[in-house]
Image: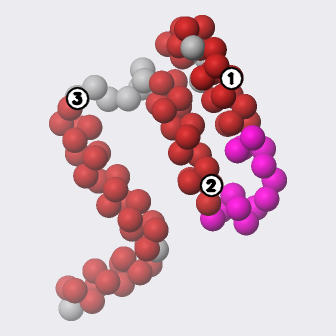
């Protein structure tokens, strides 16, 4: 995040938020508990998502059609991941047969 000019400008303008993002990301990624990391990592990474999006703003597509398509596809993939990919594939096979 510190390598992008837009995030550095944001950090100069809002230093408290930049300190929070840095400390929070450091704590989340350095916490050494494998069970927690596999099971609930996404839940604890959510507060850092806006800051990561600011850092990646240059690489995020600007075409609205693509963004709208991603708003449909990403929740479906997240739901499939939460249910379990194997269960989703088995359900799709049973619907086809």
In the rendered image, is residue 36 in sight?
A: yes
Query: Does 70 appear in magenta?
Result: no
Image x and y of residue 17, in percent: 60, 23
Total label count?
3
Image x and y of residue 14, in percent: 57, 14
Marks 3 and 2, the one that precedes in the sequence: 2
Secondary element at tag 2: helix
Picture quarter with the N terminus: top right
Answer above or below: position of 10 versus 81. above
Circle 1 residues within 10 Å: few <14, some 14–19, many ≥20: few
Residue drawn at (63%, 14%) of the image = 15
Mark 1 and mark 3 residues within 8 Å of each other at the beta carbon: no
Separation of residues labelled 1 and 3 (CA atoms) = 32 Å
Secondary element at tag 3: loop
Image x and y of residue 36, in percent: 71, 61
Mark 2 and mark 1 residues within 8 Å of each other at the beta carbon: no
Quadrant of the image occupied by residue 63? top left
Quadrant of the image occupied by residue 95? bottom left
Separation of residues labelled 3 and 2 (CA atoms) = 30 Å
Mark identifier at residue 63: 3
The residue pinned by badge 1 equals 19
Secondary element at tag 1: helix
Marks 1 and 3, the one that precedes in the sequence: 1
In the rendered image, is residue 8 in sight?
A: no
Between circles 3 and 2, the one closer to the viewer is: 2
Circle 2 residues within 10 Å: few <14, some 14–19, many ≥20: some
The residue pinned by badge 2 equals 41
Answer above or below: position of 24 versus 71. above
Magenta residues (range):
27-39
């Amino acid at each position: 995040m510190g390598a992008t000019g837009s995030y550095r400008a944001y950090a100069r303008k809002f230093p408290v938020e930049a300190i929070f993002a840095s400390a929070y990301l450091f704590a989340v990624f350095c916490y050494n508990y494998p069970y927690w990391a596999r099971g609930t990592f996404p839940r604890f990474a959510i507060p850092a998502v806006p800051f990561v999006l600011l850092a990646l703003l240059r690489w995020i597509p600007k075409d609205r059609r693509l963004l709208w398509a991603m708003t449909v596809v990403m929740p479906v993939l997240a739901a499939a991941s939460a249910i379990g990919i194997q269960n989703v594939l088995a359900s799709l096979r049973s619907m086809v047969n």
